[in-house]
Image: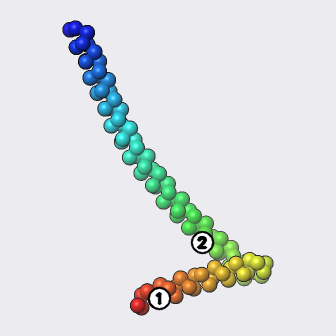
Amino acid sequence: MNTTEQHLKRIQDKLQQLLKQHTALQKENVQLKEVLNKSKEEAKVQQQHIDTLKQKVDILKLNAGEMSEADKKEFEKKINTYLKEIDRCIALLGG
C-alpha cells in the first residue's frame, strides 16, 4: 500500500469516527432538549403552585386582619384583575 492510499485510509477512518461522534452528539442533543422541556414544564407547574399558595396566604392574612393597607390594595387589584378576566371569558363565550 503506498502512502497516498494510507493517507486516504486514515482520512476515511477519521471521517467514519467523526460521523459516529456526530450521530452520538445529535442523539444527546435531542435527549437534552427533552430534559430541558420537561424541566421547564416542571418549573411552570411549581411556579403555579407557588402562586396558588401565595394567594392562599393573602386570603388567610385578609381573614385574620393581618394585612396592611398596601397589601389590601394589592389584593383588591388582583381580585379586580381576575374579575375582568372572568368577564372577558364570559363575553367570549356568549359572543
Secondary structure of the residue carrying numbered label 1: helix
Question: Which circle marks residue 52 in the picture?
Answer: 2
Which amino acid type is marked by label 2? Answer: Thr
Res. 47 in view: yes
* Residue under numbered circle 1: 90
Please name the residue shown 61% across and 66% down the image: 50
- Residue nearest the viewer, comparing 58 with 5: 5
Query: Reading the chain from its start, which is encountered first: label 2 or label 1?
Result: 2
Q: Position of residue 22 (x, y in %)?
A: 35, 35
Residue nearest the observer in this picture, 95 or 8: 8
Residue 80 coordinates in the image, percent (x, y): 62, 84
Is residue 26 placed above or below 89 in the rendered structure?
above
> Three-letter amino acid code at disc 1?
Ile
Q: Is residue 22 left or right of residue 71?
A: left
- Is 73 situated above or below 24? below
Q: CA distance from mark 2 to mark 1?
A: 23 Å
User: Quadrant of the image for the C terminus?
Assistant: bottom left
